[in-house]
Amino acid sequence: MRVAHSLGNRCREVTVQIRDANLTDMADIQAIYAHHVLHGTGTFEDVPPSIEEMTERFEACAAQRGAWLAAADASGLLGFAYFLPFRDRAAYRFCTENSIYVREDVRGQGVGKALVQRLIEAATAAGFRQMVAVIGDSDNVGSIGVHASLGFHRVGTLRAAGYKFGRWLDVVYMQRPLGVGDRSPPVEC
């Protein structure tokens, strides 16, 4: 995948590799996420988890039919994304939720969209039929726009569900069918 990187007033195209995340990515993943925790409203956490906590989350993902992806180029890790089952109850077993975080200096350059596209492909291959995006802050136009551009539809808003940085924040729910979606019964594994 190629994306445009801004370099001051210049722009250059670089090749971005989207791959499975691994344990050697955890320090970079933690740093990217910590920035979003401390400065953004896309996550409602207010204390950045440690590298050890992020590693535990990463390791638990595989046991839950999930996947973590990383986007990288020659400058290092640009972002990460993962999907997990939407909820624990059995009836939700064909529905997944995604999360995407991109390094601050490459936001708006296509990295997040590429990660979501690959999540859609991986979750479809894993047998999921619906993907849900739970987007912190209804003013998060970047995430809402990326998801809409990939076929997600806004299905609801929880008003004032969170409080961070001295203000109330909404949560936007967006949903997209995967594969044949609900047009046929799923095949039980």
Image: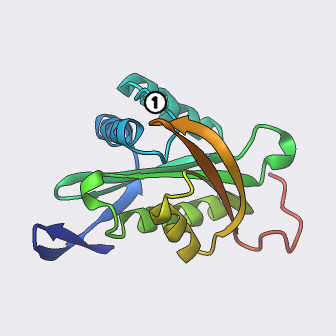
Count of number-bearing discs: 1
Q: Is residue 180 toward the left or the right of residue 126 in the image? A: right
Residue at 50% in and 33% down: 45
Residue 99's x, y, as percent? 53, 50
Q: Is residue 13 toward the left or the right of residue 133 in the image? A: left
Residue at 65% in and 39% down: 64
Residue at 56% in and 36% down: 163
Given residues 104 and 124, the one toward you in this image is: 104
6 up-or-down from 72: above or below: below
Query: Residue lying farthest front?
Result: 166
Given residues 138 and 144, the one toward you in this image is: 138
Given residues 41 and 48, the one toward you in this image is: 41
Residue 147's x, y, as percent? 55, 67
Residue placed under numbered mark 1 in the picture? 46
Residue at 28% in and 66% down: 16
Residue 4's x, y, as percent? 24, 74
